Image: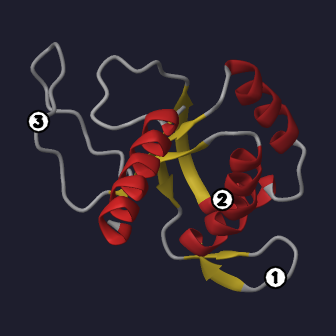
Amino acid sequence: MFNIGRLHKGMVTHPETGAQMSANKMLNEYSKPFIGKLIGRGGHPYFMQRKIAGYVDSWEEDGNFPNDPGWNFVNAMRYRSRRDLMEMVVATADARTHQFKRVGLAQTFNFPTQPMIRGHLGPRAAVFVLLALGASLLTIAVG
């Protein structure tokens, strides 16, 4: 799942306590429990990055340069299956913590994706490599 979002500017009001806080902190109140549930279902954050500069290569078919909508972050989450994705969407839509996402984000786009090129190891390969490295180091230490 690919996610891109724009946080509210300035402070936002916590829906339960009424405290003022940054939109980023508010979004974290949603993200931490969500990621915990995601990991519990065999998924994990694939990458999470914040925007640090303006557009580098952007264009439209008619030759006009699109306005910057002010995105703040981009991330991708890996789900074990599409079924898990849909179950998480349904479960979190009614969850108490989902309100924190709505208060923290001014705008977001989310859509499922399928890998075309991977520049990393998947979970199974990563575990294999770590076990092989551990065994090699143990062999060196004992031998």
The residue wearing badge 1 is 18
Q: Residue at x 82, y 44 (%)?
A: 92
Kind of element beneath mark 3: loop
Residue beneath label 3, please? 57
Q: Is residue 134 left or right of residue 116?
A: right
Gap in Å between the C-alphas at discs 3 and 2?
30 Å
Q: Disc 1 or disc 2, which is closer to the eye?
A: 2
Q: Amino acid at mark 2?
A: Ser
Q: Nearer the viewer, residue 27 or 91?
A: 91
Quadrant for the N terminus in the image: top right
Residue 110, compared with residue 73, is above or below; it is above
Viewer-proximal residue among 86 and 143: 143
Q: Is residue 132 above or below residue 142?
A: above
Q: Which is nearer the eye, 3 or 18?
A: 3
Q: Quadrant of the C terminus?
A: bottom left
Q: Which mark is residue 31?
A: 2
Q: Amino acid at mark 3?
A: Asp
Crowd rating for badge 1 (residues with CA inside 10 Å; few <14, some 14–19, many 20+): few
Q: Secondary structure at mark 1?
A: loop
Residue drawn at (31%, 28%), measured in percent from left and top? 118
Q: Specify which label sits upstream in the sequence, 3 or 1.
A: 1
Q: Does 134 appear above or below 90?
A: below
